[in-house]
Amino acid sequence: IPGLKRLLGEAEIEGFLYSNFKEIAIDLDVFNDRIARARFTLAHEIGHLVLHKEMYSKYKVGGFKERLQFVREIPDESYYWFEWQAKAFAGLILVPRDALKEIAAQNLSLAKDMGVRMEDPEDPKWGYICEGIRKSFNVSSQVIDIRMGKDGLKNSIF
């Protein structure tokens, strides 16, 4: 949908799942110009399909106006968890643990060979490591950073 993100700006929505479970809407600019973000958005919406089908059936999210109304009606804490679950699902689908572990080990070994030393899991150098890893999965470095933290891969090297 051209301009979807702008139309739904208050909710920062780049895509949504229709309640017919047959369509996903995505902002056209995101789809055309930000492929890593588009992939994450689509995986996120599939997460809603798998995890939240009952809720979507209840609210009848037929179009972007209904999606915005849904966002306004759901309690903030429930919406936070609803979105967190879909984001976690997308991260797990796009960045499988075993592949992440293998590619992270390769990148960390290369960094160590180049003299890069990490002080702790919060070391700012992780940003560079995540940037190198993200290219293997075609996702953002933020997705890699979150997955590395959640899977305990950052702590495993200390």
Image: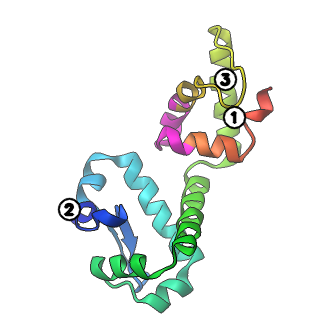
Q: Amino acid at mark 1?
A: Glu
What residue type is disc 2 on? Gly
Q: Dot 1: what SS?
A: helix
Q: Is residue 21 above or below residue 135?
A: below
Query: Any mark on residue 108, and which?
Result: 3
Residue 11 position, x and y percent, is 36, 66
Q: Which mark is residue 3?
A: 2
Mark 1, other Cα within 10 Å: few <14 / some 14–19 / many ≥20: few
In the image, which is nearer the foreground, mark 2 or mark 1? 2
Q: Quadrant of residue 1?
A: bottom left
Upstream in the sequence, badge 2 or badge 1?
2
Q: Residue at x 36, y 78 (%)?
A: 67
Camera-nearest residue between 12 and 1: 12
Q: What residue sits 57% from the left and 53% below the top?
A: 91
Q: Are marks 3 and 1 in contact (CB under 8 Å)?
A: no
Foreground: disc 3 or disc 1: 3
Q: Amino acid at mark 3?
A: Leu
Q: Which residues are magenta?
A: 131-143
Q: On screen, 100 above or below 96? A: above
Q: Secondary structure at mark 3?
A: helix
The answer for how far apart the CA atoms under marks 2 and 1 are is 39 Å
Give the residue furthest to the front: 76
User: Does residue 26 appear in this view?
Assistant: no
Secondary structure beneath label 2: loop
Residue 97 can be seen in this image: yes
Q: Residues within 10 Å of mark 2 (few under 14, many from 20)?
A: some
Vertical position of residue 105 compared to residue 55: above or below: above
Q: Earlier in the sequence, mark 3 or mark 2?
A: 2
* Horizontal side, residue 61 vs residue 47: left or right: left
Classify residue 64 by image quadrant.
bottom left
Q: Position of residue 56 (x, y in %)?
A: 48, 84
Spot occupied by residue 8 in the image (x, y as percentages of width and height)? 28, 67
